[in-house]
């Protein structure tokens, strides 16, 4: 994946990443190169971003050195970290769990999820309320042929969108969709409707 693949994630800017921190940690070259080239997104798109990235810092979780790169936006009980090999790991009080094989895969999964959420939200448009005067003017313009009927808009098909996103995720990082993994739980919740 190239830096251009994540352009919408970097619209709000990026957090600089310290070469020294990455070097001291010993992060694998591919992840280091991506982080030094792009930084980390300063704020993800959407009303409620899934994660909040932060300047990388080293931490020890249950005897394993990890590089903290993000946390949940509502608290720091769950941290997203990189292992020395570049794997994305969710770490918290209950231990830690594999999330993605690489940072680029994690960003790809997040981007697909954010696009899905934006599409799902945009299809839930609220009705528009016009004043009587504005509606009368619109009706008169329609009668004169100045306003043409819009073609019926194709509605959002949640099932197909979830299926397409799951297929894209599977091509990007199949290991991240293993039974019981973080992303498999997200897919299950999307299919059941809570999120």
Image: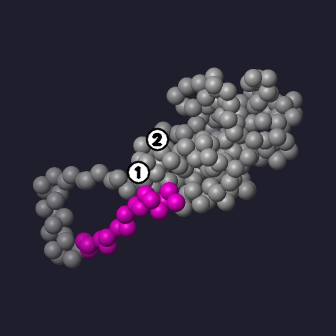
The earlier-in-sequence mark between 2 and 1 is 2
Taking depth in this image into account, of 77 and 184 the one nearest to the observer is 184
Taking depth in this image into account, of 70 and 87 the one nearest to the observer is 87
**Where on the picture, by quarter, is residue 174?**
bottom right
Residue occupied by mark 2: 47
Taking the view exactly as shown, the residue that stands out farthest to the front is: 179
- Tell me which residue sits at (79%, 23%) in the image: 63
Residue occupied by mark 1: 121
Q: Secondary structure at mark 1?
A: helix
Whether the residues at callouts 2 and 1 have beta carbons within 8 Å, the answer is yes
Residue 98: x and y, percent?
69, 39
Foreground tag (2 vs 1)? 1
- Tell me which residue sits at (58%, 47%) in the image: 184
In magenta segment, residue 161? yes
Bin the neighbour count of mark 2 within 10 Å (Cα to Cα): few under 14, some 14-19, many 20 and up.
few
Tell me the quadrant of the picture where the N terminus can be found.
bottom right
From the viewer's perspective, tell me whether residue 133 is left or right of residue 22. Answer: left
Bin the neighbour count of mark 1 within 10 Å (Cα to Cα): few under 14, some 14-19, many 20 and up.
few
From the viewer's perspective, tell me whether residue 125 is left or right of residue 186. Answer: left
Q: Is residue 134 visible from the viewing direction of this image?
A: yes
- Tell me which residue sits at (69%, 53%) in the image: 173
Q: Secondary structure at mark 2?
A: loop
Against 88, residue 63 (above or below) is: above
In magenta segment, residue 43? no
Magenta residue span: 147-163
User: How far is disc 2 from disc 1 in space, using C-alphas?
Assistant: 10 Å
Residue 115: x and y, percent?
52, 53
Residue 105: x and y, percent?
69, 50
**Which SS type dominates the magenta stretch?**
loop
Taking depth in this image into account, of 120 and 193 the one nearest to the observer is 193
Q: Is residue 16 visible from the viewing direction of this image?
A: no
From the viewer's perspective, tell me whether residue 127 is left or right of residue 153. Answer: left
């Amino acid at each position: 994946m190239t830096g251009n693949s994540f352009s919408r994630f970097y619209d709000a800017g990026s957090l600089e990443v310290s070469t020294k921190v990455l070097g001291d940690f010993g992060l694998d070259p591919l992840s280091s190169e991506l982080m030094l080239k792009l930084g980390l997104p300063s704020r993800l798109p959407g009303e409620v971003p899934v994660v909040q990235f932060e300047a990388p810092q080293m931490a020890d979780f249950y005897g394993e050195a990890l590089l903290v790169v993000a946390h949940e936006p509502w608290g720091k009980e769950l941290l997203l970290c990189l292992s020395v090999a570049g794997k994305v790991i969710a770490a918290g009080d209950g231990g830690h769990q594999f999330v993605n094989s690489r940072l680029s895969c994690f960003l790809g999964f997040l981007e697909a999820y954010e696009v899905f959420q934006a599409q799902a939200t945009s299809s839930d448009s609220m009705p528009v309320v016009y004043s009587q005067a504005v509606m009368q003017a619109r009706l008169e313009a329609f009668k004169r042929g100045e306003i043409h009927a819009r073609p019926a808009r194709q509605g959002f098909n949640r099932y197909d969108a979830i299926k397409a996103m799951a297929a894209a995720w599977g091509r990007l990082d199949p290991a991240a969709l293993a039974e019981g993994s973080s992303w498999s739980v997200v897919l299950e919740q999307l299919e059941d409707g809570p999120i």
